Image (tube, rainbow, N blue to C red):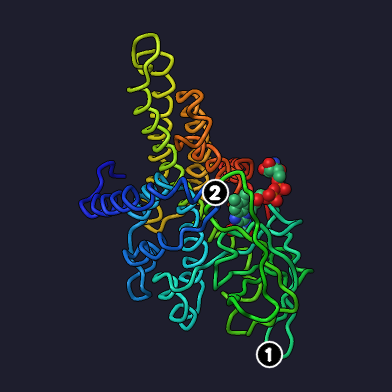
Amino acid sequence: MSYILSEEQEQVRKLAREFAQGEIVPVARENDRRERFPEEILAKMASLGFLGTLPPPQYGGMGLDYISHALLVEEVAKACFSTSTTLSVHISLTQMPILQWGTEAQKQKYLPRLARGEIIGCFGLTEPNVGSDAAAVETTATRGDGGWRLNGTKTWITNGGVAQLALVFAQTEKALGYRGITVFLVEGGTPGFSNTPLTHKLGLRSSNTAELIFDDCLVSEENVLGKVGDGFKIAMAALDEARYTTAAGCVGLAQASLDASISYAQTRMQFGKPIGGFQLIQELIADMMVETEAARFLVHRAGELKNRKLPASREISMAKYYASEAALRAADRAIQIHGGSGYCDEYPVERYFRDAKAATIYEGTSQVQKLLIGRAALGINAFV
Ligand SMILES: Cc1cc2nc3c(=O)[nH]c(=O)nc-3n(C[C@H](O)[C@H](O)[C@H](O)COP(=O)(O)OP(=O)(O)OC[C@H]3O[C@@H](n4cnc5c(N)ncnc54)[C@H](O)[C@@H]3O)c2cc1C
């Protein structure tokens, strides 16, 4: 693995950094305060190709390698983790499963529009009774005249209220357990498909979250993604993609906490000198720096495996687990360094803290990541 970025990767990082610092940072606090979904930021990101980083140009994407994708996401997350979460779901949980499992017609129909930001995507797996145990999906899809009838509720769905395309996981043959789950591509406006916004979240306040409701919603046969019964396999592959992107975002969040802390520690005077001169503050900064860099290496190692099309699930879980917890610790330390000023949104560090917590929960909690890493180390397959 190379520790030196290529010229192209440096260029992607520079472009993303300039955009994020110039366009996202100035509006991030206000959008967080107002729980406002940043449509205009997404439109600008779309014009730069940022909404389709990974899919190849033939489907409207940028065709970036995984390290470049991580660098871009890191820069966006450093400015606003809500926006990088929107991006992660739109690309890694929507476009990547379509790219990997879709028919040519599905790819042609949806990927270019998603990459151009004409439509936003979401991923509906979680339900009121189904979280970490994703194989226990209760939403049903019953085959009949004209396709499949979906009934059930999905909850905590990022982009759920703004998406025009939802990947929906439903039980098509209960007796088969996790092998009886199928994915459906459900378009916004389909009769029987509605959503209710989920507001007042602890963090990620400018990312959109909603409940999706399916009430006898008819979906045609050509909108089955992959084969009937492939749903669980598709969910796990998609979650690998998303955990990688989330881990990269968490590196950005940790870096933002570190940068803010260094700048504050250099200027805040107490006892007649900048607080950065106190060794206990230096220790907090040193810990943040080591953990941020370690998280970045874990992400880039997983990215290198992905670039080479090698198995990377365990490395991705390690990166997601470590980076999300490191981002949370970094934000906690950043608030400590800012003292009372860190406890309100005059400075961004309290937002970093609230946002970082979500990453230890979604796409598989930290406990679930540890189970996956431990099982992989011990050669245990949970499904036999
Ligand atoms: C901001 C946000 C955005 C989200 N976006 C999406 C989305 O776009 N699409 C989507 O489908 N879902 C989404 N989710 C849902 C998310 O993936 C789930 O919240 C997550 O998988 C955990 O499920 P749960 O909340 O039901 O918790 P539960 O599964 O009920 O877990 C509760 C607690 O028990 C622990 N636990 C559970 N099982 C075990 C075990 N076997 N061993 C040890 N501990 C265990 C968990 O780690 C956790 O601490 C989102 C959630 C949040 C907070």
Report the residue at 44% width, 41% height from top: 253
Query: Is residue 132 at all visible to an observer of this figure?
Result: no
Q: Secondary structure at mark 2?
A: loop
Q: Position of residue 116 (x, y in %)?
A: 39, 71
Q: Secondary structure at mark 1?
A: loop
Report the residue at 51% width, 72% height from top: 101
Q: In front here: 37 or 255? A: 37
Tell me if mark 2 has few (under 14), some (14-19) or many (20+) residues whose alpha carbon lies within 10 angstroms of its own: many
Displayed quadrant of residue 57: bottom left
For the C terminus, the image quarter is bottom right
Say if disc 2 is inside 8 Å of ligand 1.
Answer: yes
- The numbered mark at residue 146 is 1
Q: Position of residue 365 (x, y in %)?
A: 62, 45
Displayed quadrant of residue 144: bottom right
Please state if 246 lies on the left or on the right of 376 as rendered.
left
For the N terminus, the image quarter is top left
The reply to whether dot 1 and dot 2 touch (C-beta < 8 Å) is: no
Q: Position of residue 304 (x, y in %)?
A: 36, 50
Q: In front here: 3 or 184? A: 184
Residue on which disc 2 sits: 204
Displayed quadrant of residue 261: top left
